[in-house]
Amino acid sequence: MVHWWVMKLGPAKLNHGLEEYMQWFSWIGRTGLLSMLLLIAGCMKYVPPDSFSQAFLERVETQEEGPVRVSAVVLSASESEKVFGSSLPDTNIQPLWLKIHNQTEEELVLQLLSIDPDYFAPSEAAWLSRGFGERGLTDKMRYFYDQHIPLLIPAGVTTTGFVFTNLDPGGKAFAVQLLGDEKIYDFDFVLPVPGFQADFMKRDIAKLYSPDQIQALDLEELRDYLTNLPCCVLGGDQKSEGDPLNLVIIGEGRHGVVTLVRRGWDLTETLSADTAWRTAVSSIFGSRYRTSPLSPLYLFGRSQDASFQKARETVDERNHLRLWRAPVNLQGMPVWVGQISRDIGVKLSSKTIVTHKIDPVVDEARTCKKISNVTR
């Protein structure tokens, strides 16, 4: 019977049938292996790290105001995994390490909302970063809580710990606010995220002008100064007119960066082959690229000193902001002249092949920014 069945099918059909059986058994094997791996994963228990490298402290930045000193550093993705045993960036969590030195004679209270209005509680960060079927969640929550910085800092005490913030792919800009009974201590930080190079980091703003080049103006003189500025910035060739100037910001640069980032603006990366490629991929596939570089425009004989953007659905649609430090002060405060506009798509260009098309009603973007700053 078997011999007849083989002869009946013929060699070709027999081989085809055997292939189908082999594929079926192969599928069964892969399914079984996957089930076994999931079962093993479900049996894995979270084990808190016994210790971790503190090499990240080499990047720490410290600020001091009277008897209070604050140090801060933001962790990279790999550092986060080593410290917490979980891939926190995959869940949009970015640990921020703080050290607070309180040499006052009163207890200080750390305001986490000043650092990140939408910060994660330790137990929340532990829960969100749990693996599939991961056991030992109670131990994980306890470990995350132990690593969290205390909110109350007694007089004469130095304390350290982490704050679980939302992931910022670019520079980390935040304020640390400490409340005392009689005084509030404020510290503005702008920290680099490892591997990220913001365009404003490549320029030393303090060295743009010598002291004798900066004019001290009153409000009326500032109005006259702004009236006499060019209507528009210059394009990449530094000859043709570019986008119109439509924004003035007065304040210290660091504080301004912190304020803009806390209002949802992202720092932009320097232009390179890698960032240009990522921008192209984002445009082609319609994905978001929050820190995509902005092309250089020129004022005061140089490209923008800092640039920011609010990404929308794709890189083709975004709000972008460029700022230049002007050689004038108002009541001792630096004056920044800027250009803000809204990208609404892309178009062909004879100079750069492809360029962004901006909303011709440029003042609408400026008004939107002003309202956003007031209402948030």
Image (cartoon, rainbow, N blue to C red):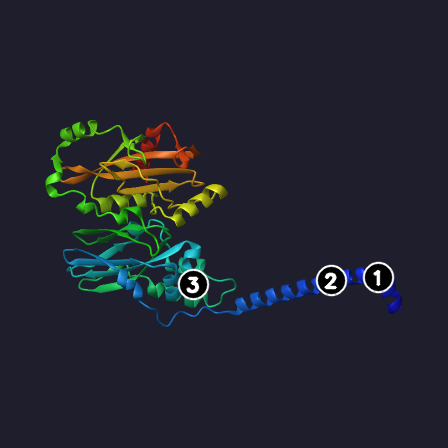
> Residue at label 2?
19
Disc 3 and disc 1: Cα gap in Å?
57 Å
Q: Amino acid at mark 1?
A: Gly
* Quadrant (top left/top right/bottom left/bottom right) for the C terminus: top left
Q: Is residue 289 visible?
A: no
- Mark toward the viewer: 1 or 2: 1
> Residue at label 1?
10
Q: Amino acid at mark 2?
A: Glu
Q: Percent position (x, y) of residue 88?
A: 41, 59
- Mark toward the viewer: 3 or 1: 1
Q: Percent position (x, y) of residue 216?
A: 12, 36
In this view, the residue in front, 358 or 348, is 348
Residue contact at pointers 3 and 2, CB within 8 angstroms = no
> Residue at label 3?
86
Disc 1 and disc 2: Cα gap in Å?
14 Å
Q: In what element is the residue under mark 1? A: helix
- Residue located at (53% from left, 67% from top): 41
Residue contact at pointers 3 and 1, CB within 8 angstroms = no
On the picture, is 209 further left or further right than 50?
left
* Quadrant (top left/top right/bottom left/bottom right) for the N terminus: bottom right
Mark 3 or 2 closer to N-term? Answer: 2
How packed mark 1 is, by other alpha carbons closer than 10 Å (few <14, some 14-19, many 20 or more), is few
Mark 3 or 1 closer to N-term? Answer: 1
Q: Amino acid at mark 3?
A: Ser
Q: Percent position (x, y) of residue 109?
A: 24, 56
How packed mark 2 is, by other alpha carbons closer than 10 Å (few <14, some 14-19, many 20 or more), is few
| Residue 150, image quadrant | bottom left
In this view, the residue in front, 353 or 334, is 353
Q: In what element is the residue under mark 3? A: loop
